[in-house]
Image (cartoon, grey):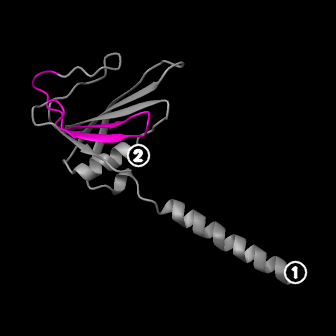
Amino acid sequence: MTVKFKYIFLIVLVVMVAVIWSSLSDKGINDLSVKFEEKAVHQNENNTGPVRRNYLVAVSDSIWQDLRVYGNYMPYAKLGTTTVWFFMKGDPMPKEFNKGKLDIADNMSVLAKYEKSNMGIVTLTKYPLTNRAKVVAVPR
């Protein structure tokens, strides 16, 4: 019986080490080549309807894949939407959200808009407020 117990203990120990190693070696936001700086966050206070999360983020570069990955890292609930507005660092940008709305002046240029809908559909729109806006359908 003790030999069987030792083998079971060894198997459990190996599985636990593998799980811990796997969870600690996952990549995160700091592993992306673009540097992100969160400037403002807004979540509506509606506890009976859809949850709307809005983020205003300054970025160091426009690597679209990294912007999508950053958006995927943001909190999301199936009962609402998550929107991330990306601006280049140093460019003029709003300081905060005004009742969940982003007041963008004429001199502000939005680099990209990431949106994840309540159905889990992800879109990344490059230059969303210009006439050269391009929606990129992002696969899951």
Q: Position of residue 103 (x, y in %)?
A: 23, 19
In the image, residue 19 lies at what x, y percent?
59, 64
The answer to whether 49 is drawn above or below residue 132 in the figure is above
| SS at mark 1 in the image | helix
The answer to whether residue 65 is left or right of residue 49 is: left
Query: Is 81 on the left-hand or right-hand side of 4?
Result: left
Say if the magenta span includes residue 100. no
Q: Residue at left 47%, top 18%?
A: 45
Relative height, residue 79 to residue 137 (above, below): above
Q: Say whether marks 2 and 1 touch (CB < 8 Å).
A: no
Q: Residues within 10 Å of mark 1 (few under 14, many from 20)?
A: few
Residue at x 41%, y 41% (from the top left corner): 74
Q: Residue 23: x and y, percent? A: 53, 60
Give the residue type that dot 1 points to. Answer: Thr
Residue at mark 1: 2
From this viewpoint, which residue is outermost toward the bottom? Answer: 3
Of label 2 and label 1, which has the lower sequence position? 1
Spatial separation of the CA atoms under disc 2 and disc 1: 46 Å
Residue 65: image x %, image y %?
A: 27, 52
Placement of the N terminus among the 4 image quadrants: bottom right
Is 120 on the left-hand or right-hand side of 23? left
Q: Amino acid at mark 2?
A: Tyr
> Is most of the magenta stretch helix, strand or loop?
loop
User: Which residue matches tag 2?
Assistant: 73
Q: For residue 74, which numbered disc appears in the image?
A: none
Q: Residue at x 49, y 35 (%)?
A: 77
Mark 2 or mark 1: which is in front? 2
- Which stretch appears magenta? 105-129
Q: Is residue 88 left or right of 18 when viewed as pictured?
A: left
As drawn, 129 above or below 27 = above
